[in-house]
Amino acid sequence: MDSPLRFVCRLGVVFRVLIEAPTGCWLIDCNGPSPPFFAANLDSYERVPAPESWISEQTMTPAQEARLQMIQPLLDCDDCISDKTLRYKMAAEAAQQHQTTTRRILRLYYRYLATGRLTQKRTQQASKSNHMIEQAIRRYYFGAKRLSLRAAYEMMLLEDYVGPDGQLESDAPTWSQFRHYYDKGYHKDPQKIIAREGLTKYQRDHRPAWGSSAGWRSQPGSYQMDATQADIYLVSRADRSVVVGRPYIYLAVDTATHLIAGVYVGYSCDETAVMACIAQAASDKVEYCARYGIEITPEQWPSAGMPSEIITDQGREFFGPRMSELCRGTGLKF
């Protein structure tokens, strides 16, 4: 190379002059390393100082020394700059020798010619990885196929980070990086949740709840009721080797005071369970606890009688014929 450290600029883009000849010059872009190209003359280019990557000190790590050894044959042959066929041939030979891909060899070669370094700046590499992750999440996780997050990660690797020989590239993001990017909150936008899970699921589980539930109803007598399946398995009393299932737990909680007014635990998940929970909420708690050998005073669980309204998540078990009949007979509102 006749002028290895000469740099020129045009339209804000800095180029390194690799070879100067009577007919023109071979240049390479310093901002985004890419294959060298030929310019007939440099009259429209402005000479500029060396970029920061060529001035700042750098420590050669063992990993960087190994990368430099991969591309050293191409660096020693100036003809690789101007001869594309020779360049690809030597890159393929180096790839075979070091058990990597031709594309990786060429990428290291172009980067070293343009920046004098064998690795990208961390910010540039992170920006590229984030862009790939963003595309994969939008295309596969929030796309029509609605793949799992792990499947979206694997599809990204197959499309963007696997070379022609089927080997995974060294700069591929890890699963932890992919999951961390997702968990940072970039994909908590309501429209993306609706696209993935549907409007009903968003309104029930993800939409923001503003204010305080205690201030929503200032007077006792307005119950909120919901159910969940317990995280335990029950066994038969007669034969403990027989698993009989997981129970459902229904709770009726007073909105104003947060007092648990009623509870039901059983295998039903229908109108029967709702009616049992309401009946327990209306019963005398002293008598209820006495049935299980627990003695309390009325002040310890001051809840008895029917509520004025019950607020639910619009589950189908709250809107059956028996519930309609209860509402008509007692004036209860659902």
Image (tube, rainbow, N blue to C red):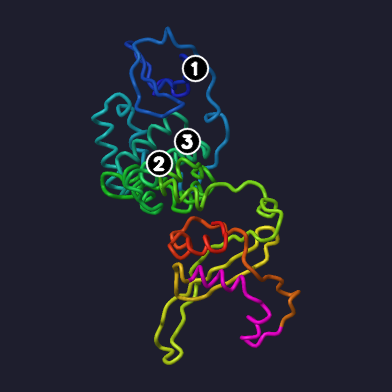
Label 3 to label 1, Cα distance in Å? 21 Å
- Give percent across and percent down for residue 280: 58, 74
- Whichever of labels 2 and 1 marks the residue nearer the N terminus, that label is 1
Q: Are marks 2 and 3 in contact (CB under 8 Å)?
A: no
Any mark on residue 12, and which? Answer: 1
Residue at 50% x, 48% y: name it: 203
Decide whether the magenta segment is chiefly helix, strand or loop: helix
Dots 3, 1 in contact, CB < 8 A:
no
Label 2 belongs to which residue? 138
List x then y, in percent, for residue 54: 52, 29
Report the mark closest to the observer, 2 or 1. 2
Q: Position of residue 194 (x, y in %)?
A: 44, 44
Q: Is residue 65 left or right of residue 208?
A: left
Q: Residues within 10 Å of mark 1 (few under 14, many from 20)?
A: few
Q: Amino acid at mark 1?
A: Gly
Quarter of image, res 20: top left
Task: Looking at the image, tell me whether mark 3 or mark 1 is earlier in sequence order.
Answer: 1
Question: In this orientation, which residue lies closer to the viewer: 71 or 282?
Answer: 282
Q: Is residue 23 magenta?
A: no
Residue 69 in the image: state x and y as whole percent: 39, 43
Question: What amino acid does circle 3 point to?
Answer: Arg
Magenta range? 273-295
Q: Residues within 10 Å of mark 3 (few under 14, many from 20)?
A: some
Q: Earlier in the sequence, mark 2 or mark 3?
A: 3
Residue at 43% x, 8% y is 44
In the picture of the structure, the residue carrying the numbered disc 3 is 117
* 284 inside magenta stretch: yes
At label 2, the amino acid type is: Arg
Instruction: Look at the image and tell me in which quarter the N terminus lies.
Output: top left
Residue reaching furthest top?
Answer: 43
The residues tagged by marks 2 and 3 sit, at their Cα atoms, a distance apart of: 33 Å
